[in-house]
Each structure stands twice: as C-alpha cells, then as structure tokens.
C-alpha cells in the first residue's frame, strides 16, 4: 500500500468522524425509569433536551425517590446515546473496510 493512498484514507476517516460527531449533536435518545414515570431525552453528545415527570411522583414527603428516578432515567438515556454512537462508529468503520472493533480516540 503506498503512502499517498494511506494518507487519503486517513483524511477520509477523519472527515467522516468529524461529520458523525456533528450529527450526534442532533440525534436524540430517550431514557426512562419507573416504567415511564420519568422520561429524559438527550442528544448522543449528552445534552439533555427534555425531562418529563409524572405529577403523581412529585411529593415533598419523598424527594429521594424522585431524585433516584431522575438519575436512573438520565443514566438510561446516556447508555442509549453511547450505544448509538458505538453502533454508528462500527457501521462507518465497516463501510471504510476497517475492522469494526478498532479503538478510536474520541
């Protein structure tokens, strides 16, 4: 493989990674807890865009329960965003003829 071709492939991969990272700012995932009592929507880059809480769980007597539900929903959304990013990276790498399990710095 000649050096020029390798450099072109590296540039293509870099361009695709930049494009995918920008795209992930707009791709949203939803996490839930308590069977949908709390729902969090966030981008795959981790920006929370919506939070919905069922009114029946908002009680001054047990703030810890609500805190736990919000944390669980945020963590669920974050895990889904991470998985979406991993899946899209794998697809992109496969499309470029690279091993799908290659580790790239983000």
Image (cartoon, grey):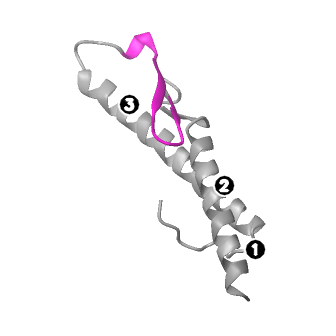
On screen, residue 65 versus residue 44, left or right, reads left
Numbered disc in front, either 2 or 1: 1
Asked if the magenta segment contains residue 48, the reply would be yes
Vertical side of 75 occupied by 1: above or below: below
Numbered range of the magenta stretch: 41-57
Query: What's the CA distance linking mark 3 and mark 2?
Result: 29 Å
Using a 10 Å C-alpha cutoff, classify the residue at mark 1 as few (fewer than 14 neighbours), some (14 to 19) or many (20 or more).
few
Task: Tell me where residue 83 appears, x and y as whole percent.
Answer: 57, 52
Q: Is residue 78 visible?
A: yes
Mark seen at residue 88: 2
Q: Which residue is mark 1?
A: 97
On screen, residue 59 versus residue 8, left or right, reads left
The structure residue drawn at horizontal position 63% and vertical position 71%, both measured from the top left corner, is 10
Classify residue 58 by image quadrant.
top left
Between 45 and 6, the residue placed more toward the observer is 6
Vertical side of 12 occupied by 64: above or below: above
Query: What's the CA distance linking mark 1 and mark 3?
Result: 42 Å
Between 69 and 4, the residue placed more toward the observer is 4
Asked if the magenta segment contains residue 82, the reply would be no
The structure residue drawn at horizontal position 57% and vertical position 48%, both measured from the top left corner, is 21
Q: Which residue is mark 3?
A: 69
The reply to whether the C-beta atoms of the residues labelled 3 and 2 are less than 8 Å apart is no
């Amino acid at each position: 493989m000649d050096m020029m071709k390798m450099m072109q492939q590296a540039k293509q991969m870099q361009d695709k990674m930049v494009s995918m990272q920008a795209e992930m700012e707009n791709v949203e995932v939803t996490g839930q807890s308590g069977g949908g009592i709390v729902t969090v929507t966030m981008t795959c880059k981790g920006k929370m865009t919506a939070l919905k809480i069922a009114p029946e769980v908002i009680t001054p007597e047990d703030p810890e329960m609500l805190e736990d539900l919000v944390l669980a929903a945020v963590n669920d959304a974050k895990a889904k965003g991470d998985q979406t990013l991993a899946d899209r990276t794998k697809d992109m790498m496969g499309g470029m003829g690279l091993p799908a399990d290659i580790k790239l710095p983000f």
